[in-house]
Every structure is written in structure tokens, then in C-alpha cells.
Amino acid sequence: MRVVRLVALPAVLVLVWWAISGSSFYLPSPILVGQAFAETWFSERLADDVLPSVGRLLAGYAVAGLLGVGLGVPIGLSRRLRATLEPVLEFFRAIPPPVLVPLIMLLAGIDTPMKVLVIVSGCLWPILLNTVEGVRALDEVLADTCRMYGVHGASRLRRFVLPGAAPQIMTGLRQALSIGIILMVISEMFASSSGLGFTIVLFQRQFQIAEMWSGILLLGLLGLGLSVLFRRLERWVLSWYYGSGAARA
């Protein structure tokens, strides 16, 4: 029954797509897109475009995670530091990351570092802000208990702060993952010669419509796959939070 529920909606969407395709050159049928998908992405483009894009996404996401948690914990623990930095954080958070692409290109060039920095610039904020809120919401009774029993420094951070803020941190990491995919594509649309974003735009300019749709389909599948992997990781990391059976879910 669970498999039926998972497959039902995608099957309906494909049937609707099939029914309305063919009326326009710009909306090819699922069969044509499927053929283009196999011919395009099961070839050298997998190594030339897909894998570099995924590598840049994971690199930017990892850097943003380390910075977000590393900065968010001290900001969340210190009321004075939080009050000092909050206006600055809100200012930079309000700037849409795509607007920073020209500036980052000037500072970092047009190669891989630029693309990674664009991903970091967008993924950082949900991780940072959720980490701050998670640390701020730590149980005061447990904090007092740690002080009474002399749990300080690294031990307090490892046994109390990070586990207590972990649900909120994972929420920020989940939000950042979808933002990272979007920025991965945007960064590759500027002065690039490889990557998924570049290839999709190239297909559009050359009127290779089925190939363009196959790239969009690949992005959707990539996002779905990463989301499933992240959910399993989250269930494992927070097995104590969701319950004893969460790690097996």
C-alpha cells in the first residue's frame, strides 16, 4: 500500500504530461524526454557536467554547514554577542544570494571557487540562524544541572549544547540543501563552460528542447535523491529525538 501511495502521484503527473504533450514544440512527450535523458546523461556528460556540479554542491554545502554551526553556537550562547551581531546578520540575510554572484565573480573569478562561494552564500543563513535559535532554546534546567555537576567547556558542548540544538540544526541543514541546489544551477549559468546549469541553458539556446527537459528532470531526481539520503541521515542522527524505531525507519 505504501508503494502505491508513493507511485500514484508521479504516475498521474506523467499521464497528464503525456496527454498535453505534442500540442507544442516546447513540450515534448515523456518518451522523447526519456530517450534524450538516456542519450544525454548516460554518456561523457555524466563525468563532464553532472559529477562536477554535485561536487561543487557538496563542497559549498559542507563549508556552509561548518561555518553555520561553528558561528551559530557561540552567538546562541552569548546574549551580548547576539545583540551586537543581530542587526548585521539580518542585513546580510536579507540580500538575495543571486544578487551577490557578480560581486563574487569579481572577487573569486569564474572558476570553481566562485561557484562554491555562491552556494555557501545562500546555504549559510538557514544553518546559522537555526543553530542560533536551537542553542537559545536549550533547557534552562539542564543548563543549571550541567553547572552544578561541573560540566564545562568541550564536554558541555559535546554532551549538552550540540545534542540539545541538534533538531533545529538539522532543520537548517535541510532547508540549506534545497537552496544549495538552486544556487548550484544559478552559479553555473554565469560565465561557465560546464555543469548542469550551463548545459541546460546551452540546450535551450540551441533549441534542443527534449534535452533541456531531460536536464530539468535530472535536477529533480538529484534533489529527490539528496532529500531521501538526508532524511535517513537525520533519522539516524536524531534517533533519540524521534524514538527508538526512527533509526530503522
Image (cartoon, rainbow, N blue to C red):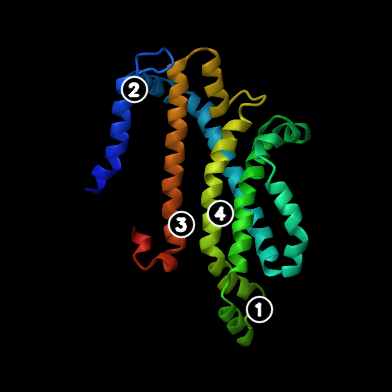
Label located before the other in sequence (2 or 3): 2
Q: CA distance from mark 1 to mark 4?
A: 26 Å
Across and down, in percent, residue 69 comes to 63, 58
Q: CA distance from mark 2 to mark 3?
A: 34 Å
Q: Would you place residue 204 above or below residue 156 in this image?
A: above
Residue 137 lies in quadrant: bottom right
Crowdedness of circle 3 by 10 Å Cα count: few (<14), some, many (20+)? Answer: many
Q: Are marks 1 and 2 in contact (CB under 8 Å)?
A: no
Across and down, in percent, residue 91 comes to 73, 49
Q: Would you place residue 189 above or below residue 132 in this image?
A: above
- Where's the C terminus, which quadrant? bottom left
Residue ID for mark 1:
152
Label located before the other in sequence (2 or 4): 2
Residue ID for mark 4:
172
Name the amino acid type tagged 1.
His
Q: CA distance from mark 1 to mark 3?
A: 27 Å
Nearer to us: label 3 or label 4: 4
Task: Specify the farthest residue to the left.
Answer: 1
Nearer to us: label 1 or label 2: 2
Across and down, in percent, residue 71 comes to 69, 59
Residue at point 43%, 68% (across, down): 240
Label located before the other in sequence (3 or 4): 4
Name the amino acid type tagged 3.
Glu
Name the amino acid type tagged 4.
Gly
Residue 234, label in figure? 3
Question: Is 35 placed left or right of 95 in the picture?
Answer: left
Q: CA distance from mark 2 to mark 4?
A: 35 Å
Task: Specify the farthest residue to the bottom.
Answer: 148
